[in-house]
Structure formats: structure tokens, C-alpha cells
Amino acid sequence: MIPKQKPKGRLRLPTSPWMIIGSVVILLIVVVVFAAQNYSREKQYMSLILAEKGAVIAKAVEAGARTGMMGMMWGGRQIQTLIEETAQLPGVLYITVTNRDGLVQASSNRELIGARLAGLLASGSQPSEKISWRFKDIGNQQQSFEVSRAFALIAGQGGGMHHQSGAIMSQGDDWCSPGGEGGGEKVILVGLDPQPFQDAAREDLRNTAVISGVLIVLGMAGFISLFWLQSYRTSQRSLQDTSAIADQVVKSLPVGLLATDKDGKISIYNKAAERITGLDLKNARGNEPASIMPANFCGLREYLDRGESISEKEMECEFTEDKAVPVSISASSIVNEEGNFVGQVLILRDLGEIRRLEEEVRRKEKLAAIGGLAAGVAHEIRNPLSSIKGIASYYKSKFADDSEDKEMAGVMIEEVDRLGRVISQLLEFARPAELKLSPANLNEILEHSARLVKQEAIAKNIRIELDLTPKGEPVVVDPDRLTQCFLNVYLNGLQAMENGGRLTISSYIKGGSFAVDIKDSGSGISVDDLAKIFDPYFTTKAKGTGLGLAIVHKIVEAHQGQVKVRSTIGQGTVFSFNLPLRPTGVRSL
């Protein structure tokens, strides 16, 4: 039995969460109290500054008016002008002079002259040189800081000054004359704009609110972090145990496992994955799978990008150069309990030996069945076809030219010929034959076969481009069979480009092989069809026999070579051939 470890003591919190909350609450109260005191102090400071500013402006207007009346014989119009000019000072909203009953006698707002303002002086009170102030709403959601004091223009008025000469009193009915209409005690009102001070006060309140919010957040964060710390320690220990178990399970799996994180980087792999793929995955962790895996994950990328799961999908993947590995692939996205994407997992099962045995059995069964069928077809169909063609030719010669009967007889002959070609292809596929090997220049074979389809390409507005290796090393091949092989691929490419395009033929030396790539810009082949295109009788064409690519595969195999196909829907298809420069023996078709 495995000895049990002694349980470790529970994590003790070094500080009570309530102490943190209490400290934050106390600090918050201190901040709020200081903020309230600061707001009150700023309000008093604002009132004092504005009151002094208003008193200075009122005194300046009063002194200017007196000076003008005594020295330059001013009247009400000149004092009105003085008031209007003074009201242009920054921060001044208005200046108004009224009598003790509130009758406006001069104002920076001329529309108020002659109006009566209420609430200036209490009943029975007298104007005083002492200033008073109040906040007053003036419309448009605006306030005014209004400063008022006695406005004395003539000696002996309001302020107890000595009476002056009668020169000033000669103004007749002017409102500023003691005997004029509205004469008597005057009050000057100066309206100042308190907005800058109020904005500053609001800014202080906002700052206080922000500081208080930060303190609350910090307090809650401290409270929560203590519990999280304990939970983290417990989870970390559990995660370490789970991780150790998972690592051992992954290492012991007989199938290859490859997992990526949410950023698409490889995070997990095992030895079986290295063995199946033949790749050295020591430096794979932290890199994208595309840096080591085949393009598009062997064609699975489109499924994974859509979030679809793949279960036991059999295919061949070229993990390393010149080595296609048959594998069974299962893949899916990994999501957590909240439904968030956290990565992808790819499971590889090597089907090499199984696939080889299955393919061998299946191929032998097919060839045996096709051989027997071909013999029967040749015996039972070819002779009747010859008779049918002869009779159709006879009747065609009997009918008049341009007649419908003669045209129908011609169609019959054409269809008999087509059926004969199908039988010939069937016999060619089933009949064993020896290759006629000889040293040949593959570039010349490619050029010759391309010339054979040149006119058909021109008719379909398809451009053929040759990019051949300058090395003309001869290869031991059967030139006629390879020409037939390349022609079949060319014709498939031309048929896939209904609206024009480009057929690119390139060759190069690759190790001990001569490599040929034939690429078209056609409609492409679906992932499901890629695995079946070399099977006999598999075709996606309405009038196809399904033997063309099967014959191509057979010819390449007979040359001890390989042919592979890559395709993307809407972008085109690439057939890649690898033919040994020096085959070790001759194989029959």
C-alpha cells in the first residue's frame, strides 16, 4: 500500500478581513470629513473674494460718478455710460442702481431701467455703506453672486458727507439730482459670475468621490484577496497532483496526442506523437502547429476553425518529406465550464500496417473482379458492338444527306465508339503489361504532353506555364506510359477551369527523385473526395468513367514512384509526382 502523507495544516490568515474593512471605513470617513470641511472653507473663501470684488467695483463706480458730477457736470446719461463700461470687466454679469423702493434708475442692462426690483431692502431699513451679498438665479440655469451697498452721489447722501455747492444740484429732473424723479437714497447692485469657483468646488467633490471609490475598491480587493490566497494555495496543490497524473497518462498513451492552448501554440505532446509523425517535438512546445505539421493540419483546419469535432477520420498526412503516414485523426476544441475556448486537442492513431494490409486485399479483389469482368465484357459486348456499328454505318449510307435519320445514325456510331473506348480503358486497367523502360528526359516528356493539350487550353482561355529544372539528367521510364499519365492530369485540370485560368507545370530534382508539380487554378477538390480520387470508377464528372486517375496511380506505382494531391476549394489542385532517378527493378502494370 502507498503510505498516506500527513495532511498539512490549514492556511491561517495573517490578518482578519474585518480589520481591513474597518480600516478602510475609518479612512473613508476621515476623507469625507476633510472633504466637507474643505468644501465649506472654499465656499467661504469664494464668498469673501467675490464680496470684496463686488464692493471694490461698486466703490469704483461711485467714485467715478462723483468725480464726473463735481468736475465735469455729469448727469444720468454719463453715469449710465460709466456703468455699462464697468460691466464689461471679466467676471461681471451686471451693474444696476436702484432707489430704496427697487426702482431701477441705471443698469448695464438697459431693458431693466424703469422696472422695479423686489426684495432689495427690508421695510423701514435704510441703505448702508456696509456690503451685503446673496446668490440669485438670473435664468438659463445660471446664478449670480449679487453684492449690494449704498450708492451715494451727493455730499450728505447716505454716507454723511458735507453738502457741496449748488452747481451739481442744477441738474433739474435728472435721476441723480436730489430733487429729481426717483431721488433719495440709492443702492448699487453688482452681479458677479461664481461659476469658476463653483466648478473648482465640484472638481474637489469629484476628486473626493474618486478617492473614496478607490478606497472602497482597495478595501474590497484586500478582503477578497485574502480568501483568494487560501483558495489559490489549495487549488495549486490539487492542480499539481492532477498535473502529475495527467502527465503520466499522456506519456503512457499508445496513440499520439497533441494539444494547443487558446493562442494556438503547442502545449502538450507525447512520445507516441513523435513516433507516428517522425518529427522531433522537443522544440515544438510554444510554437504553432503549422511550423511542424502539414499545411492546414492535413486539411482539417477548416473543420477546426468552424469549431467542429472530428472523430476517427482516416487520411494520409505528410509529416516529413517524402513520407506519407496513414493515420486516424480525432480532433476537437477544448472549452471550459463557462464555454470559453481554451485550446484544441489532436489524437493520432497509426494506421500504416492496417492500411497496407487492407489496401493490398482490396486492390487484389478489385483487380480480380475487374479482370473477370473485362474478359466477359470483351467477349459478350465487343462483337455485338461491332455488328451494331456496321448496321448503323450501313443505314447512314442509305439516308439522304442533311436528313434527321442520317444524323441519328451518326450519333449511334459515335456512342458505340465511346462505349468501345470505355471497354478499352477497362481492359487496359485490368490487363497486366510490362513497362518498356528506357532512359528519357522527363522535361521533354512534359513539354511534349503539354503541346498535345495546347489547343484545348487556348480554346478555354487557359494559360500553360512551364517551369522546368535546367538539369536534364535522364530518368529510366516508359515514355509512352508517362505521357499518358501526364495527359490524364492535364485534362482533369483543364476541365476544372471552366472560366479560364492557369496550368503550371514545374519540375525539379528532389534528393534521389525527379519531382513534378502540376497545378491548376480550378474549383478544387473537397476533403472527402481527396481520399477517393484514385479509386477505380470514382468520378465527379457527369460523363467520366472514373478510370483516368486510377490508371495514373497505377503507372506511377509501376515506376516505383509516388503521386500525391493537395487541393483547396476555390483555389485549385496540385498533383505532385516523385519518380526515382534510378529505379531498382521493373514492375508490371
Image (tube, grey):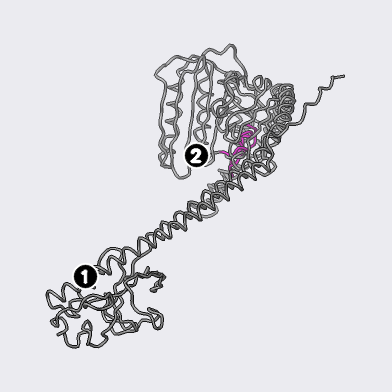
Placement of 136 over or under 518, stated as above or below: below
Residue at 12% in and 74% down: 71
Residue 420, position as x, y percentages in the image: 60, 37
- Looking at the image, how many numbered discs can be counted on the residues? 2
Does residue 547 sit above or below 196 in this rendering?
above
Residue 228: which disc?
Answer: none
Q: Is residue 357 visible?
A: no
Residue 220 coordinates in the image, percent (x, y): 63, 45
> Is residue 552 found left or right of 42 in the rendered image?
right
Magenta region includes residue 194: no
Identify which amino acid the numbered label 2 is placed on: Gln
Q: Which numbered mark, 1 or 2, is in the foreground of this view?
A: 1
Q: Which residue is tagged 2?
A: 571
536 falls in the magenta region: yes
Q: Is residue 407 above or below residue 183?
A: above
Q: CA distance from mark 1 to mark 2?
A: 93 Å
Q: Residue at x 49, y 30 (%)?
A: 518
Q: Report the amino acid beneath label 1.
A: Ala
Mark with earlier residue (1, 2): 1
Question: Which portion, as a residue range, is magenta?
Answer: 525-546
Which image quadrant: the N terminus? top right
Q: Quadrant of the C terminus?
A: top right
| Image quadrant where residue 5 sits | top right
Judging from the image, what secondary structure is the residue with disc 1 in?
Answer: helix
**Helix, strand or loop: magenta stretch:** loop
Pick the front one: 112 or 581: 112
Q: Is residue 307 above or below residue 62?
A: above
Question: Would you name the residue on which mark 1 appears?
Answer: 63
Judge from the rendering whether residue 586 lies leftward or rightward of residue 362; answer left or right.
left
